[in-house]
Amino acid sequence: MRELDRFLNILLDEIAAADGWTVEDLVSLGRIRNTPNKLEAICHHMNIEAKHGARLRALGRCRDALFHCSGVVRRGDRRHTTTLTLGWPSDTAEGVPPVLDLGERLSVSQADLAWICAFYLSIGENLLRPV
């Protein structure tokens, strides 16, 4: 998931360049390391609805739990919360993402990974249409 997020971050820079952003705006955009924030900046500049920030942030928190805590939920969605919302739905329908309590183990199935990849692909496709 870390690689998908990084790839999207780089893709956002390339989309901005292809969209004709000024050098100053490209430099400013390049300083944004947080992918959801960068996506929101791109969407705002291109007059596209920014609707994926919350899910990207949830995916980032899940990625961090997997990478830094071997999948054990150690932090909630926000400070002083005791639950972590997963960044993907519990089934293939666009249902409500499941929530895990602190101490629970986060696992990712093949179907989850496929959904996550398709989600990132859809973001890229939606951004490339106007360019």
Image (cartoon, helix red, strand yellow):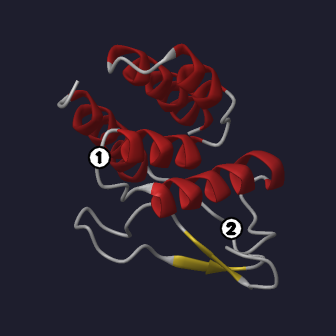
Residue occupied by mark 2: 105
Identify which amino acid the numbered label 1 is placed on: Asn
Residue at the image position 34 percent from the left and 15 percent from the top: 18
SS label for mark 1: loop
**Picture layout, residue 121 above or below residue 113:** above
Q: Earlier in the sequence, mark 1 or mark 2?
A: 1
User: Is 126 situated left or right of 3 in this image?
Assistant: left
The location of residue 61, given as percent across then percent down, is 66, 58
**Residue drawn at the location 26% of the way across and 67% of the way down:** 94
- Residue 79 pos. (x, y %): 80, 78
- Relative depth, front residue between 55 and 87: 55
The quarter of the displayed image where residue 32 is located: top right
Q: Which is more toward the observer, 64 or 7?
A: 7
Classify 30 as above or below 73.
above
Under circle 2, the secondary element is: loop
Residue 87 visible: no
- Residue 47 is tagged as 1
Judge from the rendering whether residue 35 lies leftward or rightward of residue 114; answer left or right. right
Measured as percent of width and height from the top left, residue 46 is found at 32, 39
Q: Quadrant of the N terminus?
A: top right
Q: Relative to the observer, which residue lies in front, 29 or 2? A: 29
- Residue 65 relative to residue 69: left or right: left
Q: Position of residue 22 (x, y in %)?
A: 48, 18
Q: Amino acid at mark 2?
A: Arg
How far apart are the alpha carbons under marks 1 and 2? Answer: 39 Å
